[in-house]
Amino acid sequence: MNQASLYQNANQVQRHDAKLILEEFASTLQWRSDGEDALLDVGSGSGNVLMDFVKPLMPQGAQLVGTDISSQMVGFASKHYQTEERTQFRVLDIGCKRLPQELSGRFDHVTSFYCLHWVQNLRGALGNIYDLLRPEGGDCLLVFLASNPVYEVYKILQLNEKWSGYMQDVEQFISPLHYSSNPGEEFSQLLNEVGFIQHNVEIRSEVFVYEGVRTLKDNVKAICPFLERMPAALHEDFLDDFIQIVISMNLQQGDQHKDQDQKFISPYKLVVAYARKSPNIVNNVLIETTHQKLLKGLN
Ligand SMILES: C[S@@+](CC[C@H](N)C(=O)[O-])C[C@H]1O[C@@H](n2cnc3c(N)ncnc32)[C@H](O)[C@@H]1O
Ligand SMILES: CC(C)=CCC/C(C)=C/CC/C(C)=C/C(=O)O
């Protein structure tokens, strides 16, 4: 997904979820007493969730860094929000092998909305999020899809020879937790493995209703990675096939012959995770104690 302006105009679900969750977690986030918080947002996209819902929560003197793997998204956000003080956007692949040195250990908070379901190497991404936080401690709020009917639609479309050539790698675009029987437990385990001792993970079952065929098509267009691989002349045909599959999955209500009257039901599962990094000294004591216990067990 590289079309920032398409995304900026068709991200109602993403904005709705981020707004509600940020209102809920505004007072849980551990704001600094000096108001000099530094926050990095992972997968900021066109930047409007970060600027409309995260920035207003932050103290006046706070620094914000919006990041994204897509240079097109970063270019759009930088231009759109160029007059915002203490705010910058830069390219970062959160799944990268080595973080840029100037970002490592620099942040009090990391946030991420609707991004981590795009990252197959979830463990690597979480390790990087841990390392972005200061050694003295910090916290993160991570919100992403565990599952969504869009993934089942993609898999059915891939079986159609009209589209299969564009969708060979469909699994790369399915949330790494989509097939998990216990996504909450799996994600908690990953948080533990990378060093987050204190964390809370919830899997929330949500439903969003898209009003009318055009609304659903625009929302699909904004995020579907396969459309940019095919000639624009095929887009409407692909989206029509998408809608037919949604109807066959019984996710449609209303008069099939009146585009405006149709509603499309999207039941999905959202991971909402909040985690705190403890200061190194606390971690070292805990590791030491565990180590001593293990040694005692051996003697
Ligand atoms: C659905 S958008 C979410 C944008 C924004 N956070 C919001 O809530 O509206 C997902 C964003 O994640 C970015 N993304 C995907 N994989 C990424 C990765 N490995 N590292 C950083 N960003 C990534 C995409 O380029 C895209 O801009
Ligand atoms: C009814 C139905 C299949 C709805 C799918 C709606 C849709 C466009 C989901 C997108 C989910 C997603 C990957 C969002 C994102 O990354 O922002």
Image (tube, rainbow, N blue to C red):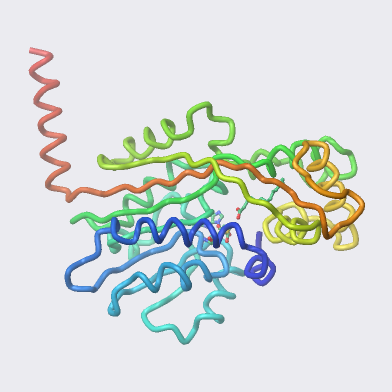
Which residue is at a point 33% across and 35% down the rendered structure image? 193
The tally of labels here is: 0
Q: Kindly give the residue lying farthest to the top in the view shown.
A: 299
Question: Of 270 and 91, which appears nearest the observer?
Answer: 270
Image-based side of 35 in relation to 10, left or right:
left
Q: Residue 272: x and y, percent? A: 43, 46
Residue drawn at point x = 83 percent, y = 37 percent: 248
Outermost residue, bottom direction?
83
* Percent x, y of residue 12: 61, 62
Q: In this rendering, is residue 18 above or below 38?
A: above
- Vertical placement of 65 versus 174: above or below? below
- Residue at image coords 43%, 32%: 186
| Residue toward you, 258 or 296 | 258
- The foreground one among 225 and 153 is 153
Q: Is residue 260 left or right of residue 63?
A: right
**Left or right: 1, with 112 as reference point:** right
Q: Quadrant of the C terminus?
A: top left
The quadrant of the picture occupied by the N terminus is bottom right
At a point 8% along the width and 18% down the height, the residue shown is 296
Report whether 153 appears left or right of 288: right
The spot of residue 216 in percent (x, y) is: 75, 56
Q: Quadrant of ligand 1?
A: bottom right
Q: Residue 95, percent across and down?
A: 48, 49
